[in-house]
Each structure stands twice: as structure tokens, then as C-alpha cells.
Image: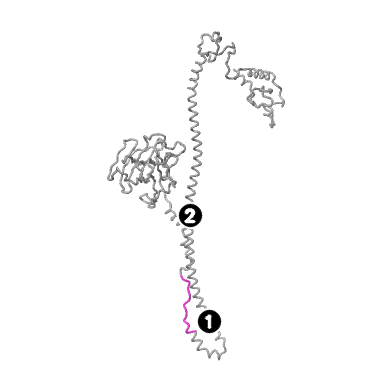
């Protein structure tokens, strides 16, 4: 009751018991100080509750409300302090009983009164214990919900930090890749400019030698022409006296062929500039590789470590990462970043020295948070044996020409024909079929890898123009992936 009365005697602005209350024409009351503070800086004097406009900036006091509030405060101050023995407000007796019908503590006098006639009572301590147990039961779902909310919030905080970490890591990888491309382009630029300058130097030297030879011929001819011209300018007697010698000198000089500019003397600009961008790009293709499957780090189990280019995976120590819905938490598994729901697709997985692995495909709705029992088609190697596992059948132990109890398969080629409902596994080294699943796939399928070993399993690059799908430029040094 006191709480209800206190709510009725509380100012709508400060939510405390009225102090010096005033009343507006709309009948709403407020502390005078609260109302003046509310109006401060506002052009219109409006009621804070109903927005009715006040005709005066100094509303009258609500004396009745003021007296009521002062009386309430005095009674409130006279109440016994917390922890002191409670008394019945009607009879002044100790509250030793609890009325089960009215659900309130009462004294022994109340028990015998008409108000509690035929009611059920319990000692105050027994009733309190029973109701505490009942409240605890009601509180348990809220406590569990609160715990879950805190866990989700903690995961959200962790996710926010992981997002920043992912962005920094991706940025670092992007810069590293572009650094390699820039280095390639710079080296290619220097090589082409060097070839141009080498040709320039070579042809400039040729022209220098040719010019020097022509300069000698020009000088000799000039001297002879000048001597003949001088004879022509002499008087007749002198000319005739020297004629024979002059004619002999001219006739004895062999008549040189007219000089010609040699073919190919100029810079071969077409060689240096023709299809320049295309030729550089074509050469760049020898330095970069296309991988048909890129792994999704957001689906990787916390104990899996992916390579920087997201094509390799191995078992490692557990990492503190967000438990997002896409992530596997039971098996050390990871999915490809892109799924297939039509067409044909092929990729090669190098299992190398791993002694416990599975490769294949998983449906988009495959279980991520528990033991996988369905929606997974794979070849498995464990305990020295190869098995073919699918949702519909018991695992099949594989046998063949190779000794399958030894890890002889270095490569597994996975061929998915979604439209024809076929998934086959072959050994590309010998072009031998290992196993084929036939199933009417109904949803998108993602490449799947499970690696329980610390040795690397890797998706190999392939040449899109190569019929066998595998690039000849495959690196054999994998240590750089985890530097």
C-alpha cells in the first residue's frame, strides 16, 4: 500500500515525493522547482505530461497535496528500520503467522478475527521457506536466460574483436599479394626498359661506325673536288699544263657506290610496345595460380589452422575464436567458401602424410555443433584403412590394386556432377576410380575436409585451360604457408 501511495504522491518529472507542489489548469501537479526547470529555455509553457498550454508562468500551489505529502513523509520516517521486528499495523502484535488465503503475514489476533475466518495459516518461518523455494523455481528460467544472454553478449564482444583481427589479417595478406605483383611488374618493367636500351645502344654504335666511315669518304672526295675546281679556275696555259695530271687523279679515284641506310637500323618499337599489357599479363599467369576451392575460415573448427591463401589446413592447438553458427565445433572440419547446386565441378586434394582425414562434400544444412550423422559424402582414411561413408549406407571398406592399408594415395580427385547426382573419387596419379556415390542431391553441396593430423592437407591449384585440371606449376615447399 505504501508503495502505491508513494507512486501517487510522486512528481512525474523527478519521480520523487512532491516538494512544494503546484497545479496547472489541466489538473496535473509538479514540484515547483521541477516545473520551472522544465520550462527553462522553452518559448511555450506547456504541461510536461499532456502538453496543454499554461496561461501563467507562476501556477498556484497545491496546498492539499503539499499537506498530504508532508504527512506521508513523516509516517515514512516513523517506520521501524530495516531488520527490526515487524508488528501488526492493526493490533501491534508480532507477525508470527502467514495467511495462505490472503498471502500476507498476520498476528495471532488477526488469526481469530472475522477477516481470516476459516483461513489456512503457517508459521512465518515455514511459509517463508516454502515461498522462497517456489520463487527460486520461478526464478531459475530467468537466471538461465540471463546466463545465456551473458554468454551471447560475451560471444558478440569476442566476435567484434575477431572481426577486427580478420580485417587486419586480410589487409596484411592483400598487401603481401599486391607487393608480389608490384615486384613482378617492376622487374618486368626494368627488364623491358633494359632490352630497349640495349637495342638503342647497339644500333647507335652501328650508326656511329657508319657515320665515321662516311665522314672519311666525304673528306677524301671533298679534297679531290676542291683540287679539280682550283685547276678549272687557273689560266688557260696553266690549266693545259696540269690537265693530264688532273684528269689522271680524277680518273684514278674509284667511283664509290652511293651510300644507303641499312635496313633494320631503327628501333623495333613494335617488338617493345606491341600488345605490351597482354604480353605482361600472359607472363604473369605463369606466376599466379587458380584454386577451384577456397576454404572458409568462418566454418573451420577452432583446432584447425588454415594457410594464408586459404587452400591448406592442418590440426593445431585450439584457438579462441567466436562460436558463430557456421563453425564446426565437434569434428575438426572445414568447408569450402562456395557451394554448388548445379553443373560439374572438380578439385584435387593433396592428403600427403596425414594419417587421419576425410574429404568429400557436405550439404549446406549439415550439422555444425554436434556429431555429424547425415548430409555428408566422403572418403575417409583412419587406422590404416580407407572407407567410403555416406548418410544412407554403412561405411564401405575400400580395396583395390594398391595396398589400401597403407597411406598410398597422395592425391584424391573429387568430381561432382550435381545434375547427374554423382560424386566420384579417383587417384589422378594412376587415373584409377576409387569410389562413386549416386544420390539425388536436394540442396547446395560444399567441399568438405576433416583433418585430425598435424600434417597439411591442401587443395591444389589448377590450370583452367589444362584438360586434366591440374597445373604443372605446383609448389612442393609448404612451410612458407605457416611462417
Q: Is residue 252 inside the magenta stretch?
A: yes
Q: Is residue 283 inside the magenta stretch?
A: no
Query: Which residues are the magenta region?
Result: 250-262
One can see residue 25 in this view: no
> In this image, 85 relative to 30: left or right?
left
Q: Position of residue 206 (x, y in %)?
A: 47, 70
Quadrant of the drawing holding the N terminus: top right
Above or below, 324 relative to 214 = above
Which quadrant of the structure image shows residue 392? top left
Disc 2 + disc 1, Cβ < 8 Å: no
Depth check, front residue: 118 or 293: 118
Which quadrant of the structure image shows residue 51? top right
Above or below, 96 relative to 219 = above
User: Most extreme residue toward the left, as rendered?
Assistant: 401
- Identify the mark nearer the N-term, 2 or 1: 2
Depth check, front residue: 383 or 274: 383
> In this image, 249 relative to 10: left or right?
left
Q: Position of residue 121 (x, y in %)?
A: 51, 12
Q: How many residues crowd around disc 1 within 10 Å: few (fewer than 14), some, or many (20 or more)?
A: few
For marks 2 and 1, give the CA distance: 59 Å
Above or below, 390 relative to 459 = above
Q: Position of residue 243 (x, y in %)?
A: 52, 88
Residue on which the image places disc 2: 183
Which is more foreground, mark 2 or mark 1? 2
One can see residue 136 in this view: yes
Q: How many residues crowd around disc 2 within 10 Å: few (fewer than 14), some, or many (20 or more)?
A: few
Q: Main secondary structure of the magenta part?
A: loop
Secondary structure at numbered mark 1? helix
Secondary structure at numbered mark 2? helix
Q: Determine which of the numbered discs, if any, sits on residue 223 in the image.
A: 1
Q: Position of residue 468 (x, y in %)?
A: 35, 50
Amino acid at each position: 500500500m505504501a508503495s502505491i501511495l508513494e507512486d501517487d504522491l510522486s512528481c512525474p518529472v523527478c519521480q520523487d515525493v512532491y516538494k512544494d507542489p503546484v497545479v496547472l489548469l489541466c489538473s496535473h501537479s509538479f514540484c515547483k522547482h521541477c516545473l520551472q526547470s522544465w520550462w527553462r529555455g522553452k518559448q511555450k509553457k506547456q504541461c510536461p505530461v499532456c502538453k496543454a498550454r499554461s496561461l501563467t508562468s507562476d501556477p498556484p500551489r497545491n496546498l492539499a497535496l503539499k499537506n498530504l505529502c508532508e504527512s506521508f513523509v513523516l509516517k515514512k520516517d516513523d517506520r521501524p528500520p530495516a531488520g527490526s521486528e515487524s508488528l501488526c499495523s492493526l493490533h501491534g502484535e508480532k507477525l508470527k503467522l502467514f495467511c495462505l488465503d490472503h498471502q500476507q503475514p498476520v498476528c495471532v489476533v488477526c488469526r481469530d478475527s472475522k477477516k481470516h475466518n476459516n483461513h489456512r495459516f503457517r508459521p512465518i518461518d515455514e511459509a517463508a521457506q516454502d515461498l522462497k523455494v517456489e520463487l527460486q523455481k520461478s526464478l531459475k528460467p530467468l537466471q538461465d536466460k540471463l546466463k545465456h544472454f551473458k554468454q551471447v553478449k560475451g560471444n558478440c564482444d569476442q566476435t567484434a574483436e575477431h572481426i577486427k583481427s580478420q580485417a587486419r589479417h586480410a589487409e596484411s595478406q592483400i598487401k603481401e599479394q599486391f607487393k608480389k605483383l608490384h615486384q613482378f611488374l617492376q622487374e618486368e618493367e626494368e627488364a623491358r626498359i633494359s632490352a630497349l636500351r640495349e637495342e638503342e645502344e647497339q644500333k647507335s654504335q652501328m650508326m656511329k661506325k657508319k657515320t665515321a666511315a662516311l665522314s672519311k669518304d666525304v673528306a677524301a672526295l671533298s679534297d679531290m673536288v676542291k683540287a679539280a675546281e682550283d685547276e678549272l679556275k687557273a689560266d688557260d696555259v696553266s690549266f693545259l699544263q696540269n690537265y693530264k695530271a688532273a684528269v689522271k687523279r680524277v680518273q684514278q679515284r674509284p667511283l664509290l657506290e652511293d651510300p644507303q641506310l641499312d635496313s633494320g637500323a631503327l628501333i623495333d618499337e613494335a617488338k617493345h610496345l606491341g600488345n605490351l599489357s597482354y604480353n605482361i599479363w600472359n607472363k604473369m599467369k605463369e606466376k599466379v595460380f587458380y584454386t577451384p576451392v577456397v576454404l572458409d575460415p568462418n566454418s573451420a573448427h577452432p583446432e584447425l589452422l588454415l594457410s594464408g591463401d586459404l587452400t591448406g589446413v592442418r590440426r593445431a592447438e585450439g584457438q579462441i575464436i567466436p562460436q558463430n553458427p557456421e563453425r564446426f565445433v565437434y569434428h575438426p572440419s572445414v568447408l569450402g567458401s562456395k557451394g554448388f547446386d548445379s553443373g560439374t565441378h572438380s578439385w584435387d586434394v593433396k592428403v600427403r602424410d596425414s594419417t587421419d582425414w576425410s574429404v568429400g562434400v557436405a550439404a549446406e544444412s549439415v550439422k555444425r555443433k554436434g556429431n555429424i550423422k547425415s548430409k555428408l559424402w566422403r572418403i575417409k582414411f583412419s587406422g590404416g584403412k580407407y572407407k567410403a561413408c555416406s548418410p544412407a549406407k554403412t561405411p564401405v571398406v575400400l580395396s583395390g590394386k594398391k595396398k589400401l592399408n597403407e597411406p598410398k594415395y597422395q592425391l584424391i580427385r573429387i568430381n561432382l556432377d550435381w545434375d547427374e547426382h554423382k560424386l566420384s573419387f579417383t587417384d589422378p596419379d594412376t587415373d584409377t576410380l576409387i569410389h562413386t556415390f549416386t544420390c539425388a542431391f536436394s540442396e547446395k553441396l560444399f567441399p568438405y575436409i576433416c583433418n585430425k593430423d598435424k600434417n597439411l592437407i591442401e587443395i591444389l591449384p589448377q590450370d583452367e585451360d589444362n584438360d586434366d585440371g591440374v597445373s604443372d606449376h605446383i609448389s612442393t615447399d609448404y612451410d612458407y604457408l605457416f611462417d
